[in-house]
Image (tube, grey):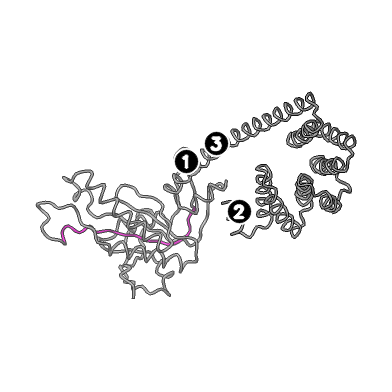
Amino acid sequence: MAQSLYNSLDDKRGIAIITGMLGEISLSMQDRSAALDQFHQAIRLLQREDETELVRRYTCMVVTVLIKQGDIERAAETFSKIDTAEISDPNERIPVEIAHALLLNAGGQRSAATASLERCLALSREYGLKRQEMAVHSELRDFARVDRDLAAYILHNDECQRVGEEISSRESAIQLALSSKEKEILAEREERERERAVLYSTLPKTVADRIISGELVTGDHFDEAAVLFADVVGFSHNSAGTGASQVTALLAQIFEDFDEACERYAVTKVKTIGDSYMCFCAEGNALVNATAVANVAAHIVDSNFTWPGGSDRSEQQQSRVQFRVGVAIGPLVAGVIGTDRLQYDVWGDTVNTASRLESTGEAGRIQVNESFVHALAEAPFQLIPRGTIEVKGKGAIHTWWLESRI
């Protein structure tokens, strides 16, 4: 499976390492012919990748296999190709010394071979190279078996088993620690995802992403922000006598529809308060922002929702939910407030104006301020002057009805 993955990724180094590991498995199963083929294949791949250390490692394994097959001449020729100069890393040096010791032994120099292996044993112990230590004990055990030296055989066999158990125990401990760490990381990731989901459910995605990245979203200023307030007309009257679950379900449908419209037109939802809905657009210029919010406003007044049926609502027109919408454009400040329960909100005179335009508007209509009319000058919308109205805190202002798209 791993080799298939590396093949699909065209990872030559990964393919070579897997092939070399297969060679080691074949060697442990005494399939020396298969091991040789796999080691040679790994070496060819690694030479193309200029992986000197791994080439040296698998070449030493080829030497070992050839010696065990009795092909001493080819083993010596293969060993002569190994670059043994300036190998300072004991982990790299020991396999080369083991291969050299086996060649010495094959040439009848048992004492020199044994001395070389003893040096490798001391070096592996000094640097805590357990796998290399086990490999040396294994070769010294084979020497003792051939020499019929029972004491030496038992010594190296016991040491080989002991070191092997240490390796297995250490690898098990590492695997256990890795597994525990993976579970910890997974738990932390799941917690972060839950936190992210909560942020996305309560804040605009762009704002949530900024908070997740560590940014403080405390006071963004926008000069040409278009703000919309929408309110359900006659909510208290029409919901009276209707079950709470029905009213809640209706509002959920309405606001979900408005949310989809905001997403479609790249408008940011701010919040809902009871039966009121608030959103704004501030990322573009005045025309872009005004057009986006105008599209949402038109969608809202054109939406088709009906009140739950009742004995006094026999006609479809009487039961249709209507909305009153107010829109203004101008400067505002936006930011996140709160600590335990974060809330994204907007402030400023533009917000107050939009709210007043909604409350002084009419059912099924969109009331906008003069600045919004100017912003929409190049957009395909029909605007009808309403006249002058009194707005609390602002006095008399000129307003328009945003009727429809042209």
Would you identify the image quadrant in which residue 307 lies?
bottom left
Q: What span is colored magenta in the figure?
A: 317-333
Q: Position of residue 324 (x, y in %)?
A: 28, 59
Q: Position of residue 140 (x, y in %)?
A: 80, 33
SS under mark 2 = helix
Would you identify the image quadrant in which residue 116 lies?
top right
Question: In terms of depth relative to the viewer, which is nearer, 351 or 52?
Answer: 52
Give the residue at mark 1.
338
Q: Residue at x 24, y 55 (%)?
A: 233
Q: Earlier in the sequence, mark 1 or mark 3?
A: 3
Q: Is residue 38 above or below residue 364?
A: above
Q: Callout 3 environment at 10 Å: few (<14), some (14 to 19), or many (20+)?
A: few
Q: Callout 1 environment at 10 Å: few (<14), some (14 to 19), or many (20+)?
A: few
Q: Earlier in the sequence, mark 1 or mark 2?
A: 2
Which is closer to the viewer, label 3 or label 2?
A: 2
Q: Residue at x 41, y 73 (%)?
A: 379
Q: What kind of residue is marked 2? A: Gln
Q: What kind of residue is marked 1? A: Gly
Q: Residue at x 39, y 57 (%)?
A: 353
Magenta: main secondary structure: strand
- Say which mark, if any, is on residue 3: 2
Whether the residues at callouts 1 and 2 have beta carbons within 8 Å, the answer is no
What is the quadrant of the C terminus in the image? bottom left
Please state if 390 lies on the left or on the right of 28 as rendered: left
Q: What kind of residue is marked 3? A: Glu
The CA span between labels 1 and 2 is: 52 Å
Give the residue at mark 3.
184
